[in-house]
Image (tube, rainbow, N blue to C red):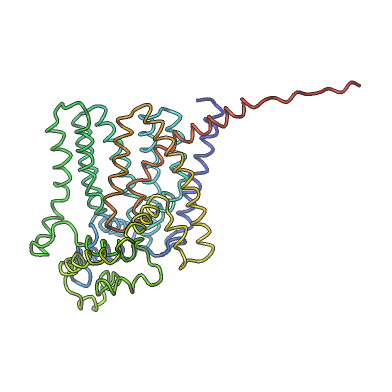
Amino acid sequence: MSANTRSVFLTAMVLGLILRAGFVLLAGNQHPTFLSGGSDAPAYILLANNLLDHKGFSYAGQPTAFRPPGYPLFVAGVMAVFGHEYLAGLRWLQFFLSLLTAAVCARVALRLFGYEAAWATFVVSLFLPTLTFSTAQVLTECLCALLTALFLLFVIHQHENADPPTAVGIGLVAGLELLIRFNAAALPVFAVLSMFRNRCKRRLILRTAAIVLLPLLIALPWFIRNQIVFRGQVLYSTHGGPNAVQGVVSPQGRTQPGDTQKLQAAMGWNLSQLETNDPKRLVLPSEVELNRHALGVIPNLWRNEGWNAVPLLLQKIADFWLSTDQLLDTKSLSWQERLIRAAGVLSYWVVLAFAVVGLLQLRKNSPDIASMLFVYAAGFTVLHFPFVMNTRLRIPLMDPLVVILAGEGLLRFVAMLRHVRWAAPIEPTHEVAA
């Protein structure tokens, strides 16, 4: 890398750090923050407070498995340490976690593309709007993005070396993430599939056991707790049914005007009635019954969609991969916030285009790894089809992969510009005689 290129990267890194830190400083200890819109933050904060108040993982004294336990426990720990300033403390902690995410993504890019691509990936990660946004939010995205980056690092290392230590790393990271986001439960499945694609079968049973059993062992206390409090009727989650109903009725899962009424009509209740300590929560039946009823109405909802299911799925894919939910369906937000989100979406599109270029280049250099990463992206996309699909659901699972590939794409774009510049014909100069 030339001294000039290194200087450019260092300058960009400093600006990216200032941007991230400024975002956290502006958010401070307030809730909600600017740009937050509607979010799940109140639910996580309420669960954390209930844990600290010795009310257990519950709403209004009723046990819940509607959200995974990992992030509320994380928030409760931050509350215990920082007291009334816990929001600022949480955001600064997530700021440093986000830098670690950028560093891990750069490490993956180093393995796949080389030294300059690692620098480019680190810079892209700092500036990507979605990863910057999640730093200051009381949401799972920031923490899970780090775990996903580590997962991808271990999976690629496992594909290249087929060694037990990275299999253990995969199992540990996947186990932690499935306690923070329910849709991360498919990570071990993908890891095992990618491992069987590898021609090296050395210690295959041992490595498979580590990838499969370690996540189950990490989640075992949560499984046991659910079996006890729900009397054997819940193992992992009560979120699947309501989320699948939203996937048809309100596919973006966002608080747009009229969405609450649609959910109320489809299920007979809405999420604001469930995630509260208000005594009115006691009017609703247990989450077991709510989930069972929601699962029961889903076939009829899709049947009523008819051929409209095709454009509905296309819309969900666009919301998931192109962030059209943040561009077109933000009527409830102020025009200033809509403008900021539109600028963020356009910036993401540029990064996504670089990522496509990076994937094509990876296909030339390492076709097996490129195929594996494509299967990862396509597989998780398909798994989300029955459920809500939006930008926030993409961030923790896909955006680390996007920035890893985009670093190489950015370098290719810069190289193309240099080639065009140096290939341009030099106009002849005509000196005028004195």
Quarter of the figure that contains the C terminus:
top right
In the picture, measured across the screen, residue 416 lies left or right of residue 167, that is right
Residue farthest toward the top in the current orientation of the protein: 433
Residue farthest toward the front in the current orientation of the protein: 307
Image position, residue 62 (x, y; %): 18, 70
- At 54% from the left and 32% from the top, the residue drawn is 7
Given residues 205 and 33, the one toward you in this image is 205
Image position, residue 92 (x, y; %): 40, 52
Image position, residue 190 (x, y; %): 23, 41
Given residues 167 and 346, the one toward you in this image is 346
Where 233 falls versus 140 (above or below)?
A: below
Given residues 232 and 42, the one toward you in this image is 232
Residue farthest toward the right in the current orientation of the protein: 434
Q: Quadrant of residue 232?
A: bottom left
Given residues 180 and 400, the one toward you in this image is 400
Where 430 falls versus 261 (above or below)?
A: above
- At 46% from the left and 47% from the top, the residue drawn is 348
Where 348 falls versus 302 (above or below)?
A: above
Q: Quadrant of residue 276?
A: bottom left
Where 368 falls versus 269 (above or below)?
A: above
In the picture, measured across the screen, residue 178 lies left or right of residue 234, that is right
How many marks overall?
0
- At 31% from the left and 66% from the top, the residue drawn is 249
